[in-house]
Image (cartoon, rainbow, N blue to C red):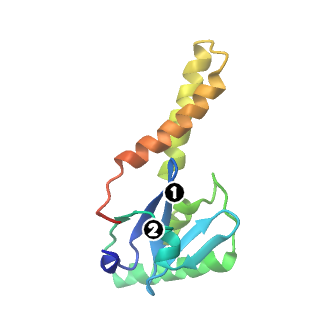
Protein backbone atom coordinates (compact mmCIF):
# COMPACT_ATOMS: atom_id res chain seq x y z
CA UNK A 1 0.00 0.00 0.00
CA UNK A 2 2.89 2.38 0.65
CA UNK A 3 3.51 2.37 -3.11
CA UNK A 4 0.14 4.12 -3.61
CA UNK A 5 1.35 7.26 -1.83
CA UNK A 6 1.49 10.36 -3.99
CA UNK A 7 3.13 13.73 -3.66
CA UNK A 8 0.84 15.90 -1.53
CA UNK A 9 -1.01 13.10 0.26
CA UNK A 10 -1.79 13.87 3.90
CA UNK A 11 -0.69 11.22 6.36
CA UNK A 12 -2.11 10.64 9.83
CA UNK A 13 -0.78 8.31 12.48
CA UNK A 14 -1.96 7.80 16.00
CA UNK A 15 -0.10 9.54 18.79
CA UNK A 16 -2.36 8.78 21.74
CA UNK A 17 -5.54 10.86 21.52
CA UNK A 18 -4.16 12.97 18.70
CA UNK A 19 -3.15 12.24 15.13
CA UNK A 20 0.34 13.18 13.96
CA UNK A 21 0.10 14.74 10.49
CA UNK A 22 2.62 14.78 7.65
CA UNK A 23 2.75 15.47 3.90
CA UNK A 24 4.27 13.16 1.27
CA UNK A 25 6.91 15.00 -0.73
CA UNK A 26 8.14 14.30 -4.30
CA UNK A 27 11.03 12.13 -3.20
CA UNK A 28 8.74 9.90 -1.13
CA UNK A 29 9.91 11.46 2.10
CA UNK A 30 7.46 12.90 4.63
CA UNK A 31 7.52 16.49 5.82
CA UNK A 32 6.22 16.74 9.38
CA UNK A 33 6.61 18.93 12.45
CA UNK A 34 7.58 17.54 15.85
CA UNK A 35 8.41 19.00 19.27
CA UNK A 36 12.12 19.51 19.80
CA UNK A 37 12.89 19.14 16.09
CA UNK A 38 10.45 21.36 14.20
CA UNK A 39 9.68 20.84 10.51
CA UNK A 40 11.78 18.04 9.04
CA UNK A 41 11.92 15.65 6.10
CA UNK A 42 12.13 12.01 7.14
CA UNK A 43 11.62 8.62 5.59
CA UNK A 44 8.13 7.13 5.60
CA UNK A 45 9.36 4.48 8.04
CA UNK A 46 10.61 7.08 10.49
CA UNK A 47 7.34 9.02 10.20
CA UNK A 48 5.13 5.94 10.68
CA UNK A 49 7.08 4.82 13.75
CA UNK A 50 5.83 1.26 13.16
CA UNK A 51 2.17 2.33 13.41
CA UNK A 52 -0.68 2.22 10.91
CA UNK A 53 -0.83 5.32 8.71
CA UNK A 54 -4.13 6.70 7.47
CA UNK A 55 -4.04 8.52 4.14
CA UNK A 56 -6.09 11.35 2.66
CA UNK A 57 -5.19 11.35 -1.04
CA UNK A 58 -4.45 14.56 -2.89
CA UNK A 59 -4.86 15.15 -6.60
CA UNK A 60 -2.66 18.16 -7.26
CA UNK A 61 -2.35 20.09 -10.49
CA UNK A 62 1.19 20.93 -11.65
CA UNK A 63 0.67 24.49 -10.39
CA UNK A 64 -0.47 23.23 -6.97
CA UNK A 65 2.56 20.93 -6.82
CA UNK A 66 4.87 23.84 -7.54
CA UNK A 67 3.19 25.96 -4.84
CA UNK A 68 3.51 23.09 -2.36
CA UNK A 69 7.25 22.83 -3.00
CA UNK A 70 7.73 26.60 -2.57
CA UNK A 71 5.77 26.62 0.71
CA UNK A 72 7.57 23.51 2.01
CA UNK A 73 11.00 25.00 1.30
CA UNK A 74 9.98 28.25 2.96
CA UNK A 75 8.77 26.47 6.10
CA UNK A 76 11.86 24.25 6.35
CA UNK A 77 14.18 27.23 5.80
CA UNK A 78 12.37 29.30 8.46
CA UNK A 79 13.19 26.55 11.00
CA UNK A 80 10.21 27.51 13.13
CA UNK A 81 9.79 25.80 16.46
CA UNK A 82 6.87 23.41 17.05
CA UNK A 83 4.08 25.00 19.11
CA UNK A 84 1.09 22.91 20.19
CA UNK A 85 -1.52 25.62 19.63
CA UNK A 86 -0.02 27.92 16.99
CA UNK A 87 2.37 25.80 14.85
CA UNK A 88 1.71 22.09 15.30
CA UNK A 89 2.08 19.28 12.78
CA UNK A 90 -1.43 19.69 11.35
CA UNK A 91 -1.04 23.45 10.96
CA UNK A 92 2.29 22.99 9.19
CA UNK A 93 0.86 20.30 6.87
CA UNK A 94 -2.18 22.38 5.89
CA UNK A 95 0.02 25.44 5.34
CA UNK A 96 2.26 23.45 3.01
CA UNK A 97 -0.61 21.79 1.16
CA UNK A 98 -3.24 24.55 1.02
CA UNK A 99 -1.36 27.75 1.90
CA UNK A 100 -3.36 28.26 5.12
CA UNK A 101 -2.35 26.92 8.53
CA UNK A 102 -5.29 25.16 10.17
CA UNK A 103 -5.80 22.48 12.80
CA UNK A 104 -9.14 20.71 13.06
CA UNK A 105 -7.79 18.92 16.14
CA UNK A 106 -7.06 22.17 18.01
CA UNK A 107 -10.34 23.70 16.89
CA UNK A 108 -12.37 20.67 18.01
CA UNK A 109 -10.52 20.33 21.31
CA UNK A 110 -10.96 24.01 22.18
CA UNK A 111 -14.62 24.04 21.14
CA UNK A 112 -15.61 20.98 23.17
CA UNK A 113 -13.26 21.73 26.08
CA UNK A 114 -14.32 25.35 26.30
CA UNK A 115 -18.01 24.53 26.07
CA UNK A 116 -17.70 21.82 28.71
CA UNK A 117 -15.85 24.16 31.08
CA UNK A 118 -18.39 26.97 30.60
CA UNK A 119 -21.36 24.65 31.21
CA UNK A 120 -19.69 23.14 34.30
CA UNK A 121 -18.90 26.63 35.63
CA UNK A 122 -22.50 27.74 34.99
CA UNK A 123 -23.66 24.73 36.99
CA UNK A 124 -21.39 25.89 39.82
CA UNK A 125 -19.08 22.91 39.56
CA UNK A 126 -16.01 23.31 41.68
CA UNK A 127 -14.13 21.23 39.14
CA UNK A 128 -15.14 23.13 35.99
CA UNK A 129 -11.49 23.12 34.87
CA UNK A 130 -11.33 19.29 35.05
CA UNK A 131 -14.46 19.05 32.92
CA UNK A 132 -12.80 21.45 30.49
CA UNK A 133 -9.67 19.30 30.30
CA UNK A 134 -11.74 16.18 29.75
CA UNK A 135 -13.63 18.05 27.02
CA UNK A 136 -10.35 18.91 25.27
CA UNK A 137 -9.46 15.23 25.06
CA UNK A 138 -12.96 14.17 24.04
CA UNK A 139 -13.17 16.83 21.32
CA UNK A 140 -9.89 15.78 19.75
CA UNK A 141 -10.59 12.04 20.05
CA UNK A 142 -14.09 12.40 18.59
CA UNK A 143 -12.82 14.35 15.59
CA UNK A 144 -10.12 11.80 14.83
CA UNK A 145 -12.48 8.84 15.27
CA UNK A 146 -14.81 10.36 12.67
CA UNK A 147 -12.27 11.69 10.15
CA UNK A 148 -12.63 10.21 6.65
CA UNK A 149 -9.50 8.58 5.22
CA UNK A 150 -9.03 7.12 1.74
CA UNK A 151 -7.04 4.10 2.92
CA UNK A 152 -4.82 2.76 5.68
CA UNK A 153 -1.30 1.40 5.47
CA UNK A 154 -0.65 -1.18 8.22
- Tag 1, which secondary structure? loop
Residue 59 circle label = none
- Give the residue furthest to the bottom: 27
Are the two marked residues, 2 and 1, in contact with CB atoms closer than 8 angstroms? Answer: yes
How dense is the environment of label 1, judged by Cα within 10 Å: few (below 14), some, or many (20 and up)?
A: some
Residue assigned mark 2? 98
Residue in the foreground of this view, choosing between 38 and 103: 38
Q: Is residue 59 left or right of residue 96?
A: left
Q: In which quarter of the image is the C terminus?
A: bottom left
Which residue is label 1 attached to? 102
Where does residue 83 sit, x and y in percent of width and height? 67, 57
The image quadrant of residue 28 is bottom left
Rendered view: 23 above or below 135? below
Residue 99 visible here: no
Q: Percent x, y for residue 31?
A: 53, 74
In the image, what residue occupies the spot 39% across and 79% down?
Answer: 7
Please identify the residue farthest to the top as the structure is shown: 124
Mark 2 secondary-structure assignment: helix
The quadrant in which residue 143 appears is top left
**Position of residue 129 in the picture relative to residue 44 (left or right):** right
Where does the image place residue 59, in percent across and percent down from the top left? 31, 74
Amino acid sequence: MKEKLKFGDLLYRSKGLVEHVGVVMKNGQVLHNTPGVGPALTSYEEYSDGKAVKVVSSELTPQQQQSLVVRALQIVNEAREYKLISFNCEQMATKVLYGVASSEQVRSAVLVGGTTAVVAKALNSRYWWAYGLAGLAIGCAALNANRKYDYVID
